[in-house]
Image: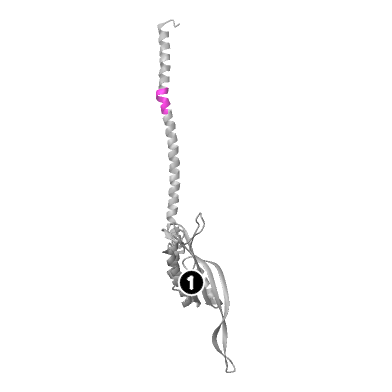
């Protein structure tokens, strides 16, 4: 035991000090250390977010700088894959290219439209409605007649001048002899030079990137109705009959 009051007071003071230190740790220093740790974590998280935002801002600035280029690319895609079939405009273009190449555009025969790229495969006209963002393929067979160079020029125009995409999947040619121009002969006689005429059947497709719900039956009807205005009289009669059949099946 402590022999003197001074010793007891000293021991009490030491014990009280220890108690104050312990209480200060649990009540003041410990929570502050925890708060400091939490603040350090929040600071680190905020710095990480700030770094991500700076990277995102830099990317957005780069994208904004490329915006005119992206708009041009989008306009080119829309031209190649228009939102509507617009077969009448296609027919006018084909007629212009045929006249420029010197070939006879005998017929334009649209086939049955199909939806491409769907998870269930191709859906034919009359059985489906194309949804926004889906690609509709319209098969179109062209029949032209001219000499070799005229036919080649027309095919080149399809690939280089036509704004919308026209995918050629097959070419079939048939050569025929047709009467040409009268050529004077040295012996005061005249002969007729035969000029080979090549009938060319071009199998291909145009495509539509729909921006609204579109019935394939309606696309089929519109394509056949537009094709009925092109080609020779016999071809127009056949196309008109096909258009009438399509309209009847769509109604």
Residue 177 on image: x %, y %: 57, 81
The single residue placed furthest to the top in the displayed view is 3
Residue 203 visible to an observer of this rendering: yes
What is the quadrant of residue 22 in the picture?
A: top left
User: How has the structure been colored for display?
Assistant: one colour
Q: Quadrant of the C terminus?
A: bottom left
Q: Nearer the viewer, residue 66 or 140?
A: 140
Residue 185 on image: x %, y %: 58, 91
Residue 232 visible to an observer of this rendering: no
Depicted 24 relative to depicted 90: above or below = above
Kindly identify which residue carries mark 1: 108
- At x 40%, y 23%, the residue is 27
Confirm whether the magenta stretch covers residue 31. yes
- At x 54%, y 72%, the residue is 201
- At x 43%, y 52%, the residue is 61
Q: Nearer the viewer, residue 87 or 49?
A: 87
Confirm whether the magenta stretch covers residue 37. no
Q: Quadrant of the N terminus?
A: top left
Residue 184 on image: x %, y %: 56, 91
Count of numbered circles in the view? 1
Say which element carries label 1: strand
Boundaries of the magenta span: 25-32
Residue 173 on image: x %, y %: 57, 74
Q: How busy is the neighbourhood of tag 1: few (under 14 within 10 Å), some, or many (20 plus)?
A: many
The single residue placed furthest to the right in the displayed view is 187
């Amino acid at each position: 035991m402590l022999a003197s009051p001074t010793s007891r007071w000293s021991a009490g003071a030491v014990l009280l000090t220890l108690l104050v230190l312990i209480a200060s740790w649990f009540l003041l220093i410990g929570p502050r250390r925890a708060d400091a740790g939490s603040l350090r974590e929040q600071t680190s998280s905020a710095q990480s977010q700030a770094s991500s935002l700076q990277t995102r801002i830099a990317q957005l600035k780069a994208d904004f700088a490329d915006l005119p280029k992206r708009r041009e690319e989008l306009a080119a895609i829309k031209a190649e894959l228009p939102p509507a079939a617009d077969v009448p405009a296609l027919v006018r273009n084909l007629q212009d290219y045929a006249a420029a190449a010197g070939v006879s555009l005998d017929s334009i025969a649209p086939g049955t439209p199909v939806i491409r790229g769907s998870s269930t495969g191709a859906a034919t006209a009359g059985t489906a409605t194309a949804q926004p963002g889906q690609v509709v393929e319209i098969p179109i067979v062209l029949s032209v007649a001219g000499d070799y160079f005229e036919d080649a020029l027309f095919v080149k125009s399809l690939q280089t001048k036509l704004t919308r995409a026209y995918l050629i999947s097959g070419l079939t040619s048939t050569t025929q002899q047709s009467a040409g121009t009268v050529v004077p002969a040295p012996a005061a006689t005249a002969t007729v030079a035969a000029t080979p005429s090549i009938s060319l059947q071009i199998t291909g497709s145009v495509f539509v990137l729909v921006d609204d719900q579109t019935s394939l039956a309606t696309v089929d009807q519109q394509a056949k109705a537009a094709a009925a205005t092109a080609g020779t009289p016999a071809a127009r009669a056949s196309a008109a009959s096909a258009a009438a059949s399509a309209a009847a099946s769509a109604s």
